[in-house]
Image (cartoon, grey):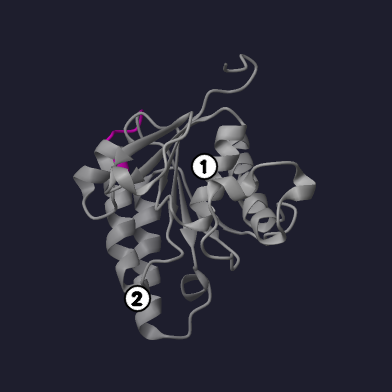
Amino acid sequence: MHNLETPRLKLGVFNPLDSLGQALIAAALHRQYEVSALLDDLNGITARPGLRCKLGSLESVETVKQAIAGLDGVFACLGGERQEDLPAHCGCLIDGALALGDAGAPRLFLVGRWEWLVDSDDSDDEALGAGLRRSLDASGLDWTLVEMPPLAAGLRVDDFSGEATTIGSEARRALDCAEALLDELRLGLHRHQCLRLRGANGGRD
């Protein structure tokens, strides 16, 4: 049963099988948020109470638009993406959100490895980064870039269950990051900024 004192936020997670995606799902369900796993194969994730599965990928504007309609926040876990694929996938995410109109666009969290964008000494990286920054700035959307720390691969929702003292150190690190991101959404922090997660006790800067 939903606690009436809990804000009813509707969240979506692209690449939900990523370790951080799984941590986000676990943390969101614990907070009694409505969470949707957005993926191109509905059989690719284990069903569990409170979790919706919706068809969605970052391959086209239309699939993004349909996947994120009605959501308050969207987390795109891009840490496993090839760098050369990021501009196109980020572009589809931005354009899909814009297609919903000002009233329907959710808060966007682009979570990945952004060192090349923030501090690059390569001309190709600089060009990619400049293009992405222009797209984000010109969009007028409510977005945050998130620099994530290295996390263990292969973590699953069940790794985050139990008391805090029984969760493994790698799972605890991922869960701290997920909790920090959900706090960012709930409190409306770091809009139009690049946020760096330290992965320890929800640390960020």
Residue 48 in picture, x, y percent from top left? 47, 34
Mark 2 or 1: in front is 1
For image coordinates 35% across by 75% down, the residue present is 127
The residue singled out by tag 1 in the image is 25
Quadrant occupied by the N terminus: top right
Q: Residues within 10 Å of mark 1 (few under 14, many from 20)?
A: many
Q: Of all residues shown, which one is farthest toward the right? A: 165
Answer with the quarter of the image where residue 195 lies.
bottom right
**Image: 67 above or below 168:** above
Query: Horizontal and vertical percent for residue 115?
Result: 52, 73
Tell which circle, 2 or 1, labels the residue nearer the N-terminal end.
Answer: 1
Residue at the (57%, 27%) spot, across then down: 32
> Is residue 46 at least partly visible in the picture?
yes
Label 2, label 1: how far apart the Cα atoms are = 34 Å
* Marker count (numbered): 2
Left or right of 137? Residue 62 is left
The stretch of residues the image draws in magenta is: 97-103
In which quadrant is the C terminus drawn? bottom right
The amino acid on which the numbered mark 1 sits, given as a three-letter code, is Ile
Of the numbered discs in the image, which one, if any, rests on residue 127? Answer: 2
Please indicate, yes or no, whether residue 99 appears anywhere in the rendered image: no
